[in-house]
Amino acid sequence: MIVNNDKYNKFKIPYELFDVTADIGFLAYGNTLNEAFENAGLAMFNIISKTDYVESIVSKKIEVFSEDYVSLLYDYLEELLFLHEVEYLLFSEFNLNIEKINGSDENNYKLSGTVKGEKIDWDNKHVRGSEVKAITFHMMEVKCDKICKVRAILDL
Amino acid sequence: MSVKEEIIKVRDNVWEIPSSYKSQMRVPGRLYLDDNGFENLDEGSIEQVANVACLPGIQKYSIGLPDIHFGYGFTIGGVGATSTRNGVISPGGVGFDINCGVKMIRTNLTQDDIKPQIKELTETLFKNIPSGVGSKGKFHLKENQVDDVLKYGAEWAVDQDFGWDDDLKFLEENGRILDADPSLVSDKAKRRGIPQLGSLGSGNHFLEVQKIDEIYNEEAAKVFGLTPGTITVMIHTGSRGCGHQVCSDYLRLMDKAYKKYEVNIPDRQLACAPVDSKEAQNYLKAMFAAANYAWANRQIMTHWVRESFESVFKKSADEMGMTSIYDVAHNIAKVETHQIKKFKQELIVHRKGATRAFGPGRIEVPKDYRSIGQPVLIPGTMGTSSYILHGTDLAMEETFGSTAHGAGRILSRSTAKKQFKPEEIQKDMSNKGIELKANTMPVIAEEAPGAYKNVDSVVKTSDKLGIAKLVAKISPLAVTKG
């Protein structure tokens, strides 16, 4: 079953994958930082699987605090990976809100929101992609000019 | 000017990056490569070897081995040894897959014995040893049990009847580093570890049924119990999500620590802390715990390999002589004593994509093998040969008792998928008489032998240099892949 998700048709390209010899990288775009981070989640689950086949059945609330935008991206992707492995879920829908808060120096940025997906069913429904071992800091970038762009490399 | 022009050829297969290359370098860099390997080496890797040479307390050389390639901060195929007196510890020098390693089991079966049932054997192994993305072990650990796995490693597995007491004699560290402290492993890492214990994972990890094809050193082969023509099994996997999370957790912590301790490093990914700091000590003990998890993981699979053979051949594992050859870690940092000039020094030896290759006489080498040096297990790629070498005195002198760990990727996964058709690879393997079972077709193309450096040349360079000497060549008969 292919799930059509209008949200991600807004962008011509929500994300692009690029080659790294042993691993894989992606650039995710958005009109806002929220959208760019949402598309980063989409990119990661299209590396692990194909999100077209992942329905939004289970909903998970996430909340991440970090010291800067790059660390926030790292911690967010890691949180998704954690939920994927521990709860055995794939995600295909991401609704996020990123804000600067007056926390301690170490936690000035907050990401909160909901991610939706479903339990993994490799045998009947989902496409097996690559296992992501970890998120790396290598060339990691978060940048907003006219549009927002985030870059990450995943260790496979 | 090209970086390579600044590199000096010390002797055949040995190259030096002088410490004048970068102002922060504390020691020279050493590259152990043949002429062809040096010619093809990318400048990024050279830069990374030079960067590691900048770490406080680094001893002798920052080392690049014959399979060196570009990594994150540290190269893969590299060794960095720092003094426990004034050095640093860096999680990047171990990598995400803590104690990724290789285990080998011998049998007294021959190819003729298994030939009629090789298909059934492959299917059984594939079924009994879970693999692939998001693979879970077949049992579910209880939350309080994971601490025991982290603390006792392979010992825990044997206590739970996954294997034999004698298995523990033939593992690096006997499958358990005593200084491991599970309380320093985050709940997140433990929770990732619980469902995955007893699973292979994906990517370059594999399980292989093999045959001892060629013996290069009869005396060493005899000591290692390798009989030409007999069947062996190789398991290549690591600490799964548990170890990946330990690395991630401490990378984040070290990113703060190196600023706090004002450690001057040329690349953020070398983030580290002084050996005696709380951050470094905590990482070390958590990393040891993840290493123990990996040894438990490979031990559990050893048991399932034996069960699979028993169910297919209707004989006991004991009758089939399925004892452990050895188990090596190729992503780890250890506290070791090495001779530097006239003095014995205690060091933190970071090996990332490097195999320990301790020579004869070292107490760490199992008694039965001590006259020869430890077995060095170097896995090939899907469908290519693997090798067993032995550690040497020269490795002790030159590379802190280390050598290469395998082939190393040269093509990205997507390039490999464009260049190779899975059906053709399958056909090619079956023409060579190799059974192949993978979870998906794309993984077959991604893991095509052509996507990797030639392991034969990596091994030959190690042998020529003498930082490990060839004992046996092992050829694949059946491969299961994530």
Image (cartoon, coloured by chain):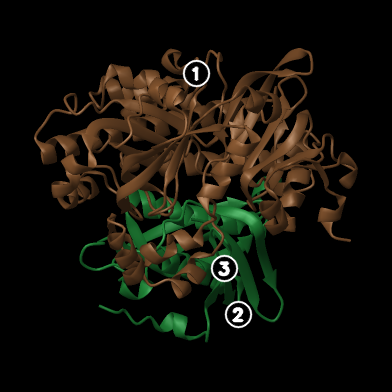
Q: Chain of mark 2?
A: A
The mark closer to the camera, 3 or 2, is 3
Mark 2 vs mark 1: same chain?
A: no
Residue on which disc 2 sits: A31
Residue on which disc 3 sits: A19
Residue B368 quadrant: top left
Residue on which disc 1 sits: B365
Q: Report helix, strand or loop for mark 1.
A: loop
Disc 3 packing (10 Å; few <14; some 14–19; many ≥20):
some
Say if mark 3 contacts mark 2, CB within 8 Å: no
| Residue at x 62% of width, y 27% of height | B401
Q: Earlier in the sequence, mark 3 or mark 2?
A: 3
Residue B95 location (% of width, % of height)? 57, 43
Q: Report helix, strand or loop for mark 3.
A: strand
| Residue at x 34% of width, y 48% of height | B476
> Image height check: is B353 above or below B325?
below
- Check disc 2 and give the amino acid type: Asn
The mark closer to the camera, 1 or 3, is 1
Left or right side of B7 for B463: left
Disc 2 packing (10 Å; few <14; some 14–19; many ≥20):
some
